[in-house]
Amino acid sequence: MTKARKHTLTTPSQTRTTTPVPVTIDAPLSPQWAFVVQFRAVPGGPAYAAGRVEHLVSGRTSHFQSLQELTTYLAGELRAADKA
């Protein structure tokens, strides 16, 4: 079952906005699916285009230069975790 929780954000102009944040209930969170993603900010460049990702259980890491590369790495690690 999925419920949406309201999350209040403060923008730089101090305008208050709310956005729904999905919350999954009754779904176990497996450590096999735990990752740390660190994004590299490039001054004047596109935000979140490059960085580093680490699979916490295995310790495997990868650097990515696009969100497509990040997605490919995550999909591969999740397939490997399902086989384990």
Image (cartoon, rainbow, N blue to C red):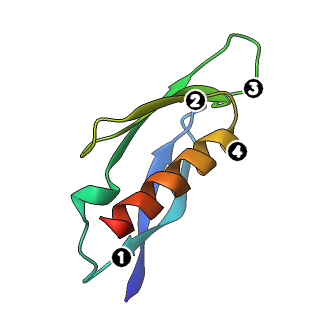
Residue 47 in percent (x, y) is at 68, 28
| Mark 3: amino acid | Pro
Quadrant in the picture for the C terminus: bottom left
On residue 14, which mark appears?
none
- Measured in 3D between alpha carbons, the distance from the residue under mark 2 to the one under mark 3, in whole angstroms, is 19 Å
Residue 29 in percent (x, y) is at 25, 67
- Measured in 3D between alpha carbons, the distance from the residue under mark 3 to the one under mark 1, in whole angstroms, is 31 Å
- Measured in 3D between alpha carbons, the distance from the residue under mark 3 to the one under mark 4, in whole angstroms, is 14 Å
The residue lying at 35 percent from left, 76 percent from top is 24
The residue lying toward the viewer, choosing from 8 and 1, is: 1
For marks 4 and 2 on the same chain, the one whose residue lies earlier in the sequence: 2
- Measured in 3D between alpha carbons, the distance from the residue under mark 4 to the one under mark 1, in whole angstroms, is 25 Å
- Under tag 2, what secondary structure? loop
| Mark 1: amino acid | Thr
For marks 2 and 3 on the same chain, the one whose residue lies earlier in the sequence: 2
Residue pushed farthest front? 83
Quadrant in the picture for the N terminus: bottom left
| Mark 4: amino acid | Gln
- Measured in 3D between alpha carbons, the distance from the residue under mark 2 to the one under mark 1, in whole angstroms, is 30 Å
| Mark 2: amino acid | Pro
Q: Which residue is mark 4?
A: 68
Q: Which residue is mark 2?
A: 12
On residue 46, which mark appears?
3
For marks 3 and 1 on the same chain, the one whose residue lies earlier in the sequence: 1
Confirm or deny contact between disc 4 and disc 2 (CB under 8 A): no
On residue 24, which mark appears?
1
